[in-house]
Image (tube, rainbow, N blue to C red):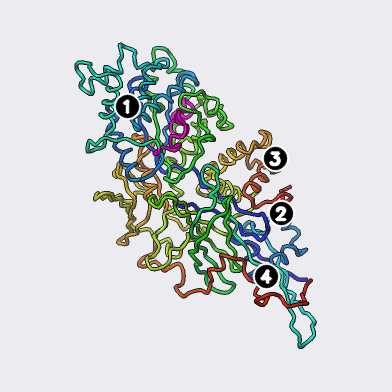
Amino acid sequence: MADDFAVAPTDVAAERNQIRRPLKPFASWQLDDAHFAFDSSVLLPSMTPELVSLIGLVRASPGAKLSVFGHADTTGNDEYNKVLSGRRALALFALLTRRVDLWEFLFTNPHGGDDWRKSDNFALRLMRDAVEDKTGALPRTALFEKFMTLLAKDASGAPFGLPKTSFLGKGADAKGKADVQGCGEFNPLLMFSKAEQQALSAANKKTERDKVQEVNRRVTVFFFPADTQVTVSTWPCPRALEGTTDCRKRFWSDHVQRRTFGERRREQPTAEDTFACRFYDRLARETADPGNIEATLFHAAPPARAPAPPRGRGIRDPGLVAAPTAETKLIAAAQGTRVEIPSRAVKTQGEDEHHEFDLRPALGLISLEATLERGTVPHTTAVGVDLIGLLLPSRAATVLRRTLGFLIPEPPTPTPLFVPEPVPIEFEDLDRPFANPFEPEGPPPEGRDVANG
Amino acid sequence: MTTKDHVVARGEYLALIANRNGFRDYRSIWNDPANAELRKLRTNPQSLAPGDVVRIPVIDPGTFARATNQTHLITAGGGPMRIELRLDDQSHAPFATRNGQLTVTLRPNSGTAGVAGPVPRQTGSAGELAANSTSEFVDGEFKITPLDPANASSGATFRFLVGELEPVDTPRGMRARLSNLGYFAGASDKDADQLEWAMEEFQADEKIPKAQRGFFNGERGRLLPTLNALGKKHGDMLPGEELK
């Protein structure tokens, strides 16, 4: 992946352009509340079909680095919810990495209502049912292992597991810093209105309240590019079972307002102010924010015979100019499957055309390339990364209607960006300061007569 | 001396404007008394805003009286411009002594832009990478060779757009510097919210006192510590060049 950076040239010593690769996830995956046993960190077999899309994404992006973020709802206190969300994140992390010891930890160390042993060891009973251990003969660790095998499998039934190096912190921290963490109730997708909150806070409304809050109880996995480097010691998030102190250091300045129930209900992604943590806000926004996707300009692949040009400096590539509106469709393809999505709305902004596509038909399709067809002119464009992000929305229930921005190539053939005629530029240009053309080659003659000085 | 006005367009920097107007050294324009106002407004002549007016002096052809029948050396001022980059990874560690391929688009003094490279280059111990040329820089790309040849995605590609760095006290200039420093300052100029949030992240990271935080509220003075910190962190503003 390449990023564009604006720079200034210089001839002054010590002046420079500091350029840092952004920490930018390219996709996210989410496990909903319904796949955990009620009010606990015990995973349910219903999660397996959900896991298939995660596995697809892992396989489509070799070397990608994952980081797991648990979330609680806004009922209860901050500290309790922080650990609860961390435990759910740990439970999923343990499943992905086949860490039976982590489940063993969760089992032996209950946290308030999240007690795997409550109701006569409900977790074990649930697992024995699932793996058909009717006699209850399996020892606990063997049972965990067998249940993990049952849950973590791909569409063909093959077992699935990831090494610790597949995670962002690469397992450098024994307690999973940068690999797995809980956000508690700091980053909800939904904030009630004040009125709703009041109406639902009555004791007899608990069931209803829990139902509405379901959307906030989730575990999100972010995917980072393979070459992402993070230093575990400076990673801002506290470990999964640690308190909220380090979370609060990253709060937005208006976090109080963000965390207060307001006059109206606020819901992501239309409301952008429900996350209190600016670090998480940025990560989530980079993958799921429709505003971000709208701003993505898709470029045509350069003509095969011309040298691959660096992208134009904010100007339009001459081969890519706006053309009058014509029927445009997006074609997503993967592994022999092809989905055609017609453009359902068009708006023009300056030279850019913005098309709106309903991407639901392509849900679940992992595509590394998509073709935009305009009339009869196919325009292959590398939108894969964005599509993956799009196709794995932060919530399955989210309507997958996003606005894509792109530049339309002018038919029939794009003109090469650069004139093929060779331009006399020497590579040495780049390797040493230019020789002063006014100065003759070789050492200066004795007693030289220098003008201006 | 008479001057003509040049209105800066997007992507233009003073060395480029000087070059196109027949000056070898942009300082002849920058230091001209006619540009005193511009110097007050902008601290870095290679980081101008579209719409800025540069007063270009009429060239005074240098004349020298020298004896005939001897060789004289006339040295002109000015020289090549450089692109100076420092490349960091996401953990703020430099891409130190990494090999890669550098490609730049150059536009000779009279002619069409062309691509030079790729040439193999290695970054310095602090991630430094420089390119020199007397031609106008247009843009370029440095592709870091993956350490693990089996994993093509373990490299990194930096594309740089020369002349697009606008002054630090303009929204585009803030956005560019914040993006260069790894903040997510929005994908387009329209994304003012995202820029505001990135500013706050920067202010928090740089420990700018709360009283001096804020954004475009008309109180430029209050924001000066942020803007100066941003310019220096990015490296195009040197100590002594602070906005006042």
- Residue A267 within the magenta-colored segment of the rendering: no
* Mark sitting earlier along the chain (3/2): 2
- Disc 4 on helix, strand or loop? loop
Label 1 crowd bin: few (<14), some (14–19), many (20+), radius 10 Å: some
Q: Amino acid at mark 4?
A: Arg
Query: Can residue A295 be seen at all in this image of the molecule?
Result: yes
Label 3 with label 4: CB-CB less than 8 Å: no
Q: Amino acid at mark 1?
A: His
Residue that numbered label 3 is attached to: B222
Label 3 with label 2: CB-CB less than 8 Å: no
Is A169 located above or below residue B33 in the figure?
above
User: Magenta region's main secondary structure?
Assistant: loop
Residue that numbered label 4 is attached to: B24
Cα separation between marks 3 and 2: 17 Å
- Disc 2 on helix, strand or loop? helix
Which residues fall within the magenta stretch? A165-190
Q: Amino acid at mark 2?
A: Leu
